[in-house]
Amino acid sequence: MALGLALCLLVPPAVMAQNLYAPVARVNDRIVTEFEVQQRQRFMQLLNAPGADRENVIDELINDRLHDEFAARFDLKLSDEAVQSGLSDFAARANLSVEEFTTALEQSGVSQQTFRDFVVTQLTWRDLIRARYGAQVNISDAEIDRELGRSGAGSGIRVLLSEIIIPAPPQQAARVNALADRIAQSKSEAEFSRYAQQYSATASRGRGGRMPWTPLEKLPPSLAPILLALAPGEVTSPLPIPNAVALFQLRGIEETGAPAKSYSEIEYAAYYIPGGRSEAALNEAARVRSEVDTCNDLYAVAQGQPESVLDRGAKKPAEIPQDIAIELAKLDPGESSTALTRAGGQTLVFLMLCKRTAEANAEVSREAVVSSLRQRKLQGYADQLTEQLRADARIIMK
């Protein structure tokens, strides 16, 4: 964690907006306030954590409300000792005591309560998921062997998928979710293909959503266990991503006989074009595409515009937002995608892959593999439960 350096470099924040306790979102009978949003955003920025932009912060605070509300149904509360241990473990990542950590946060404008609330919610949700789903997570020897094969010099795995990504701006979310539930019941490749041609926003829609063979390691880490649980012809449950819903149909899976690759980081750039998926915005994206060959060329395109129109950076695969990771999996360096939007569908994302950095495969123990597989499966259950809670909740943005 680079907190120590970040705390030294960042100065206390400017005076916040006057009405700090105005509601930003209502989640059933609970609210998320402007103060909480500013505090969480500042906290994540100090940690150099991904998803520190306002949109993601509000989304995570909504999830926190849903998680806390669900845990309260079971009267699940952490002991004082568990809370203190969690705070200590978190602070230790920055080689600080709890007191040193909270002092450093407060000097940079983040309250001790913000830190405590964040840790307590995370730990409570973790304990709830373990208690609710732990007995359902079984790891077979075959899974361990296959994972070891991917981690070391064994055979890699590739999948043959069809995809559908349906834009779902807030005002259309209910309709799109109902449509996605219907698509998830597809009984054949032909049926899924027809839906893709009619509703998908990706470049593959003209091919009925059919993607070429794709190495599993190129796909988002969170998607891999979901796909491996499918039989050919089956379709995933609808997967919510920012301003859209994604579905995948597994058409084939095979071991390649070639060593699996893993990546330490993936570098990509996102250039934001106002207008969403309007004809004007798509035409502008096509113009940009004709002018750029590499990510460096985007700096010339963005010249004279606000810095916020161009994001470029390198992240570990697990840190990349799932919708972006899905699109990057289809790209080679220098290629681009315009399937995604932001700002409630009002901004088109011109996404370009800069490069992937491979890391050497390391020797790992079977115990480490079991732990990793167990955590991934539990995270899959956690994500699905969160999606269900969001679907059932009354969420009103202010």
Image (tube, grey):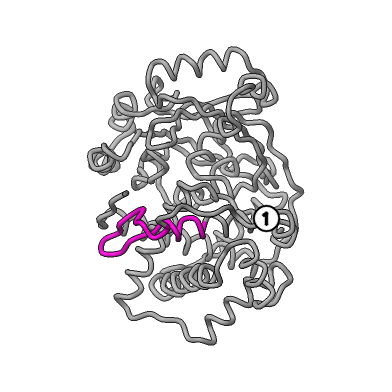
Magenta stretch, residue numbers: 20-40
Instruction: Judge from the rendering whether residue 177 lies leftward or rightward of residue 253; answer left or right.
Output: left
Question: What secondary structure is found at the residue carrying circle 1?
Answer: loop
Q: How many marks?
A: 1
Which amino acid is tagged 1? Val
In the image, residue 25 lies in the stretch drawn in magenta? yes
Position above or below: 216 against 225: above
Position above or below: 398 against 168: below
Instruction: Judge from the rendering whether residue 238 lies leftward or rightward of residue 146; answer left or right.
Output: left
Foreground pick, 108 / 242: 108
Residue that mark 1 sits on? 11
Residue shown at 45% from the left, 23% from the top: 203
Residue shown at 63% from the left, 75% from the top: 89
Foreground pick, 274 / 372: 274
Foreground pick, 167 / 193: 167
Residue 303: x percent and y percent? 64, 22
Residue 347: x percent and y percent? 44, 30
Instruction: Judge from the rendering whether residue 239 lies leftward or rightward of residue 285; answer left or right.
Output: left
